[in-house]
Image (cartoon, rainbow, N blue to C red):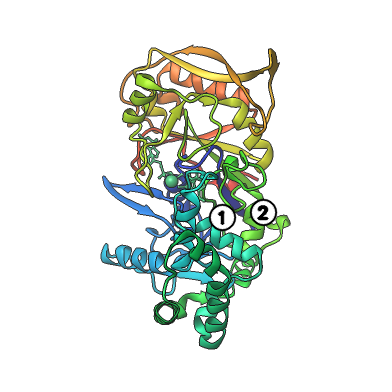
Amino acid sequence: MPAVVVVGAQWGDEGKGKVVDLYARYADLIVRYAGGANAGHTLVVKGEKLVLHLLPSGILHEGKRCLIASGTVIDPAVLLEEIDAVEARGVNTHDRVFLADRAHVVLPLHPILDGIREQGTGALGTTRRGIGPCYEDKVARRGVRIGDLLRPETLRARVSALYHHHAPFLAAAGVTAPDLEQTLSTMLRMGERLAPRIVDGTPLVSEALTAKQNVLLEGAQGALLDVDHGTYPFVTSSHAAAGGASVGAGIGPTRIDSVVGIAKAYATRVGDGPFPTELFGDEGDALRTAGAEFGATTGRPRRCGFFDAVALRRAAQVSGLDLIAVTKLDVLSGLPRLRICVAYEVEGERRDAEPYDGLGDVTPIYEDLPGFEGDLSSARRVEDLPTNARRYLARLEELVGVAIGPVSVGADREATADLADPFDLQ
Ligand code: GDP
Ligand code: IMO
Ligand code: MG
């Protein structure tokens, strides 16, 4: 009963979409376990780009089933738009895309609340997709769930209570609340369209595992954006780390076999929060341009910096990584020197393992390796890579203490070295 988790090992946008699309050929069921339309997972197949926010990244593999599980928050309008967009590309989604009835609904009110908060002093640089406010309502036990879209009376009771709850905050901010009746009619209409796909998520995943099918659990965001284990408060509001896969998919941790972490060959972050290896000025701009580092969801320029092995060690602990897939190695081609942050200096002392939050001033301690040149995109085995690229990977592996598996050398599905079946890891 192999279940494999694919999780971001940095601050999101590591290339999870690409890796999940690659691994989907080995899977029977692909499950998105956390987050919402704050995610933007990019797939490039034969030069054609597809950005997914809610649909699992196995969607292009026709015979495979996809579940958006209970741990997610779903904006039905975004989901329907996404389903229509992939259908228009000739991808059948009927009888293969399912939603867990326990996933929470992102209502029109949620992005409004997110936007108001982002104008205040506590701004975090969120995606403004309503993710934080929706998870808050969930935990406060006043949320609306996907299954409620099929029960008009329950929906009315829940949405009106929720709107009533938030009314004073909106009024104080001088913002007009969305119209309740309009919200209800839109939600019911969308619920009707989604009805054939709404299922009880746990038996779907559990029975697939019992039938010895391969289940790929797709994370969103990254371990360092996890609400418990990330750089709090500059985090998202869900369990983005691998532990979230068990809760989010509704299966016990005993049923998960291995965890693959995705890490860029350098580091990026969108939104605010600590980022010790961040590069500013020309160096940062050069990396941003070379890596096309602009958000897949918001289009914001991503902050760019050197690979942070301290951060990766932390992510490896938090998510129990068995293997790391390194992406975007090609982006570093042509740099005269490759820098890796191996430790931090904090108040004059060297620290090899230190979480970011609450640290104050952190100075990265760097190690430099010689750079490499040339177009890597045709490498299909790590041994095809230039010697210095292999030395860089070997050093990352050593510093993080986790084996490196596939290495991505271009955005396209094909541009991958050492791809192997992750269900064979155990
Ligand atoms: P995700 O959120 O983790 O799925 O990552 P995103 O899709 O937000 O961002 C990763 C970006 O890098 C996308 O534009 C991908 O097409 C691109 N990408 C993925 N792997 C590679 C790679 O190996 N090389 C290059 N140059 N681009 C890549
Ligand atoms: P994928 O799945 C990168 C960041 C936001 C912000 C913080 C909180 O594509 O890797 P939120 O809207 O979740 O309340 O924002 O988290 N963030 C992401 N950064 N990739 C993502 O998703 C992200 N999802 C949220 O920029 O800093
Ligand atoms: Mg992304």
Q: Is residue 247 visible?
A: yes
Residue 122 screen position, x and y as percent: 55, 45
Q: Tell me the CA gap for discs 1 and 2.
A: 9 Å
- In this view, the residue farthest toward the right is 254
Q: Is residue 403 above or below residue 419?
A: above
Residue 217, numbered label: 1
- In this view, the residue farthest toward the bottom is 153
State the residue at coordinates (47%, 68%).
107
Residue 222 screen position, x and y as percent: 55, 43
State the residue at coordinates (62%, 67%).
211
Residue 256, numbered label: 2
State the residue at coordinates (40%, 25%).
384
Residue 173 screen position, x and y as percent: 48, 59
- Is the C terminus in the top left, top right, bottom left or bottom right quadrant? top right
Secondary element at image label 2: loop
CB contact under 8 Å: marks 1 and 2: yes
Towards the viewer: 191 or 369? 191
Residue 310, numbered label: none
Q: Is residue 35 visible?
A: no
Q: Is residue 11 above or below residue 287?
A: below
Q: The disc labelled 1 sits on which kind of residue?
A: Leu
Secondary element at image label 1: strand
Towards the viewer: 67 or 134? 134
